Image (spheres, grey):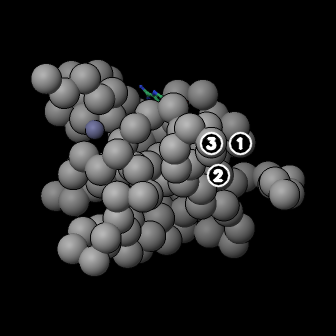
Amino acid sequence: MNDCVFCKIIAGEIPSKKLYEDELCLAFYDIAPLAPQHFLVIPKEHLTGANRINEENAAVVGHIFAVITKLTAVLGFSDGYRVVTNCGDDAGQTVKHLHFHVLGGKQLGSFN
Ligand code: AMP
Ligand code: ZN
């Protein structure tokens, strides 16, 4: 049984504010936004995190970044944004399905 919340969003079993979808990925607004603009992009393939990206499946990551370029332009904040992926417990990853946060719409603070 797959109890992954993001797989359930892909399957339509959990509602989401969908921004974009194609055969490889899905983009939707984060339920708890940390910036005026905050959406997530996920591969449809269930990879638990960035540490599962390898030579065989890495193409989807480039595709996701191309989708991010288009979506930030459509949403009007292509001049500046941050893309973040948390990997594993030490990074505070709470949903174990690879996802890229896209944050923008304000001056983002330094995180280091
Ligand atoms: P992370 O801490 O990097 O694993 O981020 C997980 C993100 O998923 C958090 O920013 C949550 O607010 C977001 N999230 C969790 N459940 C949902 C949901 N059902 N719809 C949209 N975003 C969600
Ligand atoms: Zn999943």
**Which one is in front in this view, the residue at disc 1 or the one at disc 3?**
3
Q: Whereabouts is ligand 2, in terms of quadrant?
A: top left
Crowd rating for badge 1 (residues with CA inside 10 Å; few <14, some 14–19, many 20+): some
Earlier residue among tags 1 and 3: 1
Lower position in the chain sequence, tag 3 or tag 2: 3
* Nearer to the camera, 97 or 105: 97
Image coordinates for residue 53, horizontal then vertical, percent: 35, 64
Q: Residue 96 sits in which quadrant?
A: top left
Q: Residues within 10 Å of mark 3 (few under 14, many from 20)?
A: few
Report, in whole angstroms, how far the alpha carbon at label 1 lies from the one at label 3. 22 Å
Q: Determine which of the numbered discs, if any, sits on residue 103 in the image.
A: 2
Identity, as a three-letter code, of the amino acid under mark 3: Asp
Does mark 2 have its CB less than 8 Å from ligand 1? no
Q: Position of residue 3 (x, y in %)?
A: 25, 23
The reply to whether dot 1 and dot 2 touch (C-beta < 8 Å) is: yes
The numbered mark at residue 35 is 1
Q: Residue at x 49, y 53 (%)?
A: 100
Classify 34 as above or below 31: below
Mark 3 lies on residue? 90
Residue 104, image x, y percentages:
69, 54
Q: Label 3 vs label 2: CA separation?
A: 21 Å
Can residue 27 be seen at all in this image of the molecule? no
- N-terminal-most mark, 1 or 2: 1
Q: Tag 1: residue type?
A: Ala
Quadrant holding the C terminus: bottom right
Q: Which mark is residue 18?
A: none
Quadrant, the N terminus: top left
> Which residue: 60% across, 28% down?
32
Dot 3: what SS? helix
Helix, strand or loop under label 1: loop
Give the spatial CA distance, label 1 vs label 2.
Answer: 6 Å
